[in-house]
Amino acid sequence: MLAFLLPSALPLAAFTLGPMVSAAWVSLQQWNLLAPMKWVGLDNYARLLTDPGTGEIFLHTLYYIVGYLPIVYVGVWPSRWP
């Protein structure tokens, strides 16, 4: 039974799980693409949470979610009516 899932599980792992794990690994490094990676662990996340501009960025994202996306979905939705 599991053999039937293998053809779809391999691309899922290769194109979804692989990039997710890779992105998580890179987020724990200090890297400018020229020098070798340096392990910093969770310091990048600590710096993100203590940066005063982070709150403003999250606020802009909230404005986008609440203000723009409903307009787009309402604008697209009537065009799908028969």
Image (cartoon, rainbow, N blue to C red):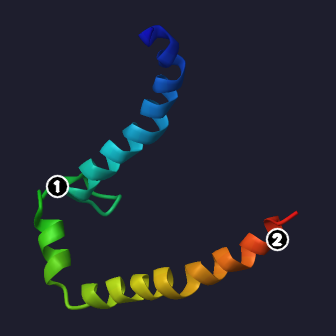
* Kind of residue sitting beneath label 2: Ser
Picture residue at 48% right of the left edge, 17% below the top: 6
Using the image, determine if residue 60 lies above or below residue 21. Answer: below
Using the image, determine if residue 36 lies above or below residue 65. Answer: above
Q: Earlier in the sequence, mark 1 or mark 2?
A: 1
Quadrant showing the N terminus: top left
Q: Which mark is residue 38?
A: 1
- Asked whether disc 1 touches disc 2, contact meaning CB atoms under 8 Å apart, the reply is no
Neighbour class for label 1 at 10 Å: few (<14), some, many (≥20)? few
Residue 79, located in which quarter of the rendered image? Answer: bottom right
Picture residue at 25% right of the left edge, 58% below the top: 27
Badge 1 element:
strand
**Disc 1 versus disc 2: distance between alpha carbons?**
51 Å
| Front-most of residues 50 and 70 | 70
* Kind of residue sitting beneath label 1: Lys
Using the image, determine if residue 10 lies above or below residue 27. Answer: above
Q: Which mark is residue 79?
A: 2
Position of 77 with respect to 54 (left or right) is right
Quadrant showing the C terminus: bottom right
Picture residue at 27% right of the left edge, 60% below the top: 31
Q: Position of residue 34 (x, y in %)?
A: 34, 58
